[in-house]
Image (spheres, rainbow, N blue to C red):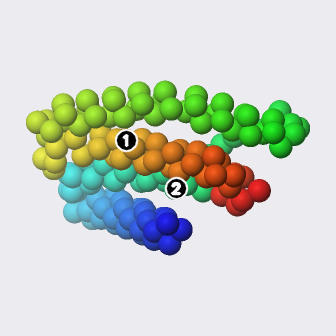
Amino acid sequence: MRTLGTWLQRLIELLMAIMLAVMVVAVFINVGLRYLAGTGFAGSEELSRLLFVWLVCLGAILATAENRHLGFDLVQSRLSARGRQICAWITRVLTLYPLWLLIQGAFEQVKVGIGIFSPVMGYPLALAAAAVLVMAVAMLVLLAVDSARALGGRETGAGGEQS
């Protein structure tokens, strides 16, 4: 399981690097064409916007997997080990509802976006909503894995290291 997780993490990092490189090249070419030829690549903005949405969503998945999201632990850090565990479970339970709303909303947007196409490049707008759907489902899976580990007595701390 650990090697699968590491492999998926590296794959996401590679995808993010490729997306960022494509965004940089597309914007650079567009700027160069505007200054040198007085014209540009019309799809550059749409492509960059789509890739940016996917980049953010994939980054959120990685941050969740590595337990690197922003957190406020002023109170939690002063609690006993049992108190921290209780806070972690409260957080897990409270996280379920927003994730469910995100999955529901993103799924509806994917369904709507299948028949609507971007004005310049012509890709289905469901592609952008799919990024949020993939992110929410991945976060739900990661939450389930984290909960299973906690039930098995292998509680993880910040950064994924075991405590």
Placement of 53 over or under 62, stated as above or below? above
Q: Secondary structure at mark 1?
A: helix
Q: Residue at x 49, y 66 (%)?
A: 1
- Residue holding disc 1: 132
First in sequence, mark 2 or 1: give its number: 2
Query: What crowding class fits label 2: few (fewer than 14 Cα within 10 Å), some (14-19), or many (20 or more)?
Result: many
Q: CA distance from mark 2 to mark 1?
A: 14 Å
On the picture, is 99 further left or further right than 19? right
Three-letter amino acid code at the position of disc 1: Val
Location of residue 148 in the rendering, given as x and y in whole percent from the top left corner:
57, 48
Q: Residue at x 48, y 29 (%)?
A: 98
Q: On the rendered image, what quadrant is the C terminus found in?
A: bottom right
Which of the two residues, 4 or 121, is positioned nearer the viewer here?
4
- Residue holding disc 2: 62
Q: Residue at x 68, y 55 (%)?
A: 154
Location of residue 162 in the rendering, given as x and y in whole percent from the top left corner:
72, 59
Taking the image as drawn, is residue 57 in sight?
Answer: no
